[in-house]
Amino acid sequence: YPSEVIRNFSIIAHIDHGKSTLADRLLELTGTVPKLRKDNQQVLDKLKVERERGITVKAQTASMFYSYMNKRYLLNLIDTPGHVDFSWEVARSLAACQGALLLVDATQGVQAQTLSVFHVAKEKGLVIVPILNKIDLPAAQPELMAAQMQSTFGVDPSDILHISAKTGKGIENVLQAIIERIPPPASASAKNDNRLKAFLFDSSYDRYRGVISLVSIQSGVLQKGDRIQSMATSKRYEVTDLGIMSPEEKPTASLREGQVGWMVCGMKDSAEAHVGDTMHRVGETVEPMPGFKLAKAMVYAGIFPVDSNDFVKLEESIKRLTLTDRSVTVSRESSTALGQGCRLGFLGTLHMDVFRQRLEDEYDANVIITAPTVPYKVIYRDREQLVSNPTDFPDVTDTSNKVVEVQEPVVNASIIVPEEYLGEMMDLCFAHRAEEMDYRYLDVSGVTSSRILLKAVMPLSEIVTDFFDKLKSRSSGFASFDYEDAGYKASNLAKMVFLINGKPVDALALIVHRSAEQAVGRAWVKKLHKVIPRQLFEVPIQAAIGKKIVARETLSAMRADVTAGLYGGHHERKLKHLENQKESKRRMKKIGSVDLPQEAFFDILSSK
Ligand code: GTP
């Protein structure tokens, strides 16, 4: 396949605008897969979690063949994930493309993620093919949405394709537009350069074969038996197997310039497959492709087995899962309240949910995942510390700790919402410490309900918990939301510690903004008061910042005889009750002189 008949493209869209459905239709129409058995059974979404949540988590790639004007074309679809947590995956898969299908739901119009993925694609210099989907729906407003795309993206309405990925209407036009509008990959052989240069843009892990890398061949030919070398690590490998994705892995004899495919080369661990790496032949030198930033963990959570005897099993399951998902970071964590566990770092909260679900599938015992926290930067007079666990956060009120400043990660948030919800959304953002708020109308005039793009700088910690749920419910589901990393910003934060009978409980420490310390402290001591069983003596429950107590509740003392209140005092029933008490004693944790059932912690700490 000379590069002039190759097209590398992605589909970019907001969640639910029909990316997977369109991909399915393209695969069908090109005969890559037989016509689907069931309506809307998506071929490209492989993970069970993905199917259940209806989102694409892992980028998938497929090659198709299509004949047009008496020429046979090789079309490589590089699928991109559709969620904010994975925007770095979007960026890296787009680097292997020359064009992108910008898909917009004709009933919904441009949404927050449509904007963010559009900007990434534009930055990469890709040709954009604008498409309005779901025109079969009665609620579709193609003319209005076309005008909106024109004003937002500067596209000519006559260039916009109108399709229904569901019914298949207009799909041929999409294939033709891919061929006619998207340029073929630049040919290196035209410049007489036949040195192998393979760009690694994704990888997966297979228990038997090890790492399977997805590569895009920039120049030269990759074949079985080739000795190749990584530019990132200088490690050498021998290619043992390779082929195209069609849509499953299909072995081929070689991969040539312009092609996209998979290869196995004896990498044992996914950590060896550096996304953004350039592979070349041993003994040759090439210019590396511009590198990629490594995925950064932005959300951390502790994970503990409910039964502490299960720790080894839990850790093994986590290790197995991280083999297939390098973006999760793992370290050990132990806590007096919860015992031995692991601290995991995720790209975002969805990433965390997906991992949790995979873990539950893989590992058939109960685990508790603590509420998510973000990495803080603590600046001391002479050094800097990144703190991803509140327990390690210093007491900033103690001047002997020499803390100059505390910084927290912030994001540029974008919300798109019908104008009648603007006030509600601004309130929500303010309540979550938004700054530099700004908005503009997205729609052209003359529309009954205009939509607004609201922008703000917000602390990441404010959006990792339930911000998205609140946003959805307070806008009746109409708001869409996206964010991008905006670095760190100084903030007035402190560690809040909870004391039970004067003893601090490590697992409960949290970082609060000083403006909210009263409210947060009060809410938490109330919660604790509810779940901690009464003891034989009075127990104070306090929230403290440094030496200052900001909230307090008192648990009154209980009478010693648990059976005293039992009606009738039947002997057997009495015995049973004592038995139960013994059983729950086993699962008690001691904080100072106070016995606490582990369940109390689970109730409080569970992020669910
Ligand atoms: P993510 O994987 O979450 O990014 O979503 P997606 O963009 O891949 O959307 P998907 O293809 O899963 O489609 C979302 C929903 O819209 C599904 O219920 C589809 O059946 C439906 N849908 C997609 N295209 C059309 C269309 O042209 N018409 C109608 N009526 N429904 C469609």
Image (tube, rainbow, N blue to C red):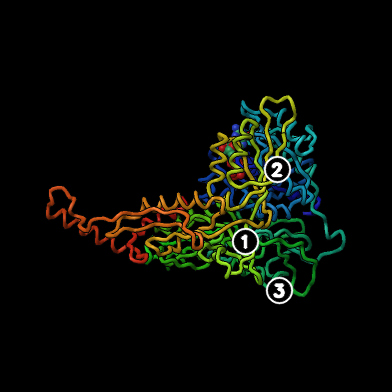
Element type where label 1 sits in the image = strand
Amino acid carrying mark 2 in the image? Leu
Residue denoted by label 3: 234
Residue drawn where x is 48% and y is 67% of the image: 333
**Which residue lies most toward the right here?**
191
Amino acid carrying mark 1 in the image? Val
Mark in front: 2 vs 3:
2
Q: Position of residue 521 (x, y in %)?
A: 47, 53
Residue denoted by label 1: 406
Q: Which residue occupies the foreground of this view, 388 or 123?
A: 388
Q: How many marks?
A: 3
Q: Quadrant of residue 22?
A: top right
Q: Quadrant of residue 535?
A: bottom left
Element type where label 2 sits in the image = helix
Distance from the alpha carbon under mark 2 to that under mark 3: 38 Å
Q: Position of residue 15 (x, y in %)?
A: 61, 42
Mark 3 is surrounded, within 10 Å at the Cα level, by few (under 14), some (14 to 19) or many (20 or more) other residues, namely few
Determine whether, in the image, residue 604 is placed left or right of residue 487: left
Residue drawn where x is 42% and y is 68% of the image: 312
